[in-house]
Amino acid sequence: MASSSVFLASPILPSKPAQRRPLSLPSATSLPSSISAFPRSLRRPPPNSRPLTAVAAVSVEQQDSVKPAAQPSSPPPALPFRIGHGFDLHRLEPGLPLIIGGIDIPHDRGCEAHSDGDVLLHCVVDAILGALGLPDIGQIFPDSDPKWRGAASSVFVREAVKLMHEAGYELGNLDATLILQKPKLSPHKEAIRTNLCDLLGANPSVINLKAKTHEKVDSLGENRSIAAHTVVLLMRK
Ligand SMILES: [Zn+2]
């Protein structure tokens, strides 16, 4: 018997039913109507499930009958901090420029992409958008929109920074990790970091950049792709 069963055998009922607060998203979010904040299966208990308490069951029924859409009734909470994570990966192909953090890096191949394929700037944008609770870079800046097609990735960063300020936040700090087998990034790291600071309007002390290989395994380790992770912390202004 698993040790956790000892605890599950004697459930502790809460002294009063938990408040069911609707999830609210930032006003800048415009999700398609087909996307719901909660999957339907999470909003309604399975038919054969036993209600936890009579009060909780009534609460669910009331919410479904009186407020079926669970509309947000209050503005989103003004969190003092918001954290966001971004990830991106691009295929490397011969004959293309390799742009990382807005810097042209000499290499025998570059990123296949609609834009300039800047893997670092793309995941920085996704980290900021994620922290703001917004959809990803492909949804906010679709390449089907002529406005964004072929744009330098610095444009996306500036737009994400603008959205961040409009939401009332500023950058706390950013930590990014690039994963590539070749070329060595150490000669270019400071140029990339300086450019990133300019784009974000940030002090260099809060922008950190790391690079590592992929131990020669998989596409990343075989010089066939490049990836990046970014974590940002935003602070309320
Ligand atoms: Zn990308």
Image (cartoon, rainbow, N blue to C red):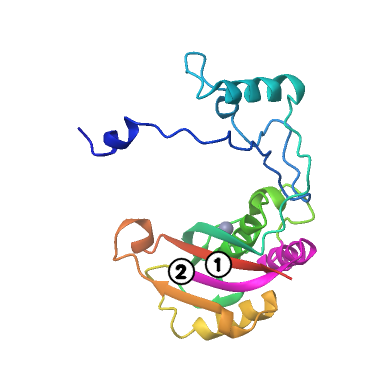
Tell me the quarter of the picture where residue 61 sits.
top right
Q: Is residue 153 magenta?
A: yes
Magenta-tinted stretch: 151-178
Of residue 174 and residue 50, the one placed in the foreground of this image is 50
Q: Which residue is mark 1?
A: 120
The secondary element bearing badge 2 is classed as strand
Q: Mark 2 touching mark 1, by CB under 8 A?
A: yes
Ligand 1, by image quadrant, is: bottom right
Element under disc 1: helix
- Which of marks 1 and 2 precedes in the sequence? 1
In the rendered image, the vertical position of residue 93 relative to residue 51, given as above or below: below
Q: Is mark 1 within 8 Å of ligand 1?
A: no
| Residue at the image position 68 percent from the left and 47 percent from the top | 139
* Alpha carbon distance from label 2 to label 1: 7 Å
Q: Is mark 2 within 8 Å of ligand 1?
A: no
* Numbered tag placed on residue 178 in the rendering: 2
